[in-house]
Structure formats: C-alpha cells, structure tokens
Amino acid sequence: MPPAGLLVIGDVVTDVVAIHREGIAKGTDTAADITLRPGGSGANTAAWAARLGADARLLARAGFDTAEWHTAALVRAGVLPHVRVDAGRPTAVVIAMVDGTGERTMLTNRGAGGAIGPGDWADELLDGVGHLHVSGYTLFAGPGLLLARRAMAAAAGRGARISVDPASTGFLHDFGVERFLAETAPAGLVIPNLDEALLLTGETDAERAAELLSARYGTAVVKLGADGALLARRGRVSARAPGARVDVVDSTGAGDAFAAGYLTASLGGANDADALAAGCRSGADATTLVGGRPDLRLSPDLSPDELYPIDTN
C-alpha cells in the first residue's frame, strides 16, 4: 500500500474573529462578538483532515509569542505538528470581521509565517506521506517560494501526489498569474475557489475555468461556496456536488475544511463524486462554527479557555 499521510505546508495564525450584525460604523464603536482562535489556512486544513481521520501533519512557522499555544492546539486536534519557532517575529495575526451573512473581511499580518523558508525543510518530513498539500500563501514570500520548490521537487521524487490551494486573489494578483502557474507546475491538483479559478484563467465561467486548469494540472477542483463544487480532469468536467444547506455563522476556514474533506476522502480511495461531496460537507460544517477549526464541535463540553488555554506567565 502507498503511504497514506497528508503533509500540509502553510500558516498558523492567531485569528481574532469579530462578528458584527450591523454595518461598520466608521469613526466610532460597532458592537461585535469577538473571539480569539488558532487558525491559518494550512493549519485549518490539517486540523479538519485529522478530524476526518487522516494521518495529518503540518509544516509551519510560528512566532515567539504564541508558538506553544498553537502547537498545543494542533496536537489536541490530532495533527502531527512540525512547527518551527521564529525567535525574532510574532505569530501571524488575522482580524476577521464577519457580517450578518457570514461573509468576512480580513486584516492580515503574516508575521513569522511570511518567513518560513527552505531552512525549515527536511526530506524526512515526507516519510510516510502520500500527499503534499501546499497553501498558496507559502509561495507569496521569497523564502516560502524556495521552500515550496524544494518540497514539491522532493515529493515528486518520491512519487507523492501534490496539490496546491491558490489561497487569496489579492496576493495571487500581486504575485502574478503566469508566475503562479509556472511555480506550481509540479502539482497534479489545484483547489481554487471560484474567484481564484477565474483569475487564474481569465474566464468568466466556472466550468470553463475548471477545464482549463485541469488541462494544465491534470485535475482541478473548483469550490463554489454554497453552490457546491465541481471537478475537471484533463480538460473535461467529470463530477459535481451540491452545497450543503446550513445556518452560516462564520465562513472563516470553509475553503480549508473543504480541501481537507476532499483530500481525506480521496486518500481513502473515494471516487471523484464522493470526494467532492465530502469536501462540501466539511466546508459547510466549518461555516457553522466561529473560527476555522473543528475543535469546538469535537469537544462541546469544554469552555473556550479549556480548548485554547493562553499562558499569561
């Protein structure tokens, strides 16, 4: 049997989630429910994959301020963390402002996550790994790009499958579409949301974008939010899945959870349609929680302080 481990390369982030029911009142106060959670696109994907039964590992860089907190949260989620501690930088922070529909607007400081690089890599990280998943955020800083190149080359050399999530239309636009496509050429699977898929192809239609991306990568899975997802292989759409209907609380991490659901099912031998459906279920589940991780659902009897203890010493 081929190795079944899933190694994710991406960020760990301290998420400050502010849910406001009314519009933001500029220049004064706006009432909001504010919570602190461990997050980060790569870390969220690894945590959801572990929740779903995957042998999930994460390579990330955290800052001197909260590295122990983040590592402990990953371990509690069932993830094997390879978290490098940056002695000179704080952990990345995202302030997510979530409106009454669950849509979020984010303010981002990449902190230590922006400094992850080839020095954090060792080929032994691939021992027991059958799939390498790279968060696009890793590529958007020079050291991370070098790391991604090295990791993808090593994974390809071992015959592991490789996927990439473009992660952010803003960063993707600044990085350059053609550059991104060239740098991620070793991947056999790309998992964009609709906006990212359209940006990467210049198309205006989800199906056509998926077809073009699959012609380049081999397989493309396009996330359509509440409308589900579709999958194309070698230039042709071959599977679709409807979105699951849930009461949305916070959309933070939904795309990360989708990737975890899809990848875990695929690693387990599911066919395309079933893997897509698993991704949609996980993505929908994530929107029913505050923050991007499944921990609260796993441990409903624990208070937030017990789930995410903060050492104040």
Image: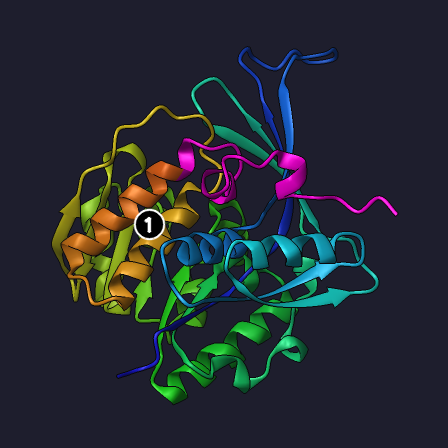
Prevailing secondary structure class for the magenta stretch in the rendered image: loop
Q: Residue at the spot x=75%, y=44% of the render?
A: 310
Q: Residue at the spot x=51%, y=44% of the render?
A: 295
Q: How many marks?
A: 1
Q: Taking the image as drawn, is residue 299 in sight?
A: yes
Q: Is residue 74 above or below residue 251?
A: below
Front in this rendered view, residue 38 or 40: 38
x then y, percent, for residue 282 = 34, 44
Q: Give the magenta-colored segment's residue range.
A: 286-313
Q: Taking the image as drawn, is residue 223 in sight?
A: no
Image quadrant occupied by the N terminus: bottom left
x then y, percent, for residue 150 = 53, 81
x then y, percent, for residue 111 = 72, 53
256 lies left or right of 67 = left
178 lies left or right of 306 = left
SS at mark 1?
Answer: helix
Type of amino acid at the residue the image marks with label 1: Ala
Q: Residue at the spot x=52%, y=72% of the render?
A: 148
Q: Is residue 100 above or below residue 282?
A: above
**Quarter residue 68 falls in:** bottom right
49 lies left or right of 79 = left
Q: Residue at the spot x=84%, y=62% of the render?
A: 88
107 lies left or right of 44 = right
Front in this rendered view, residue 80 or 16: 80
Residue position marked by numbered label 1 in the rendering: 197
Residue 39 sits inside the magenta stretch:
no
x then y, percent, for residue 256 = 43, 49
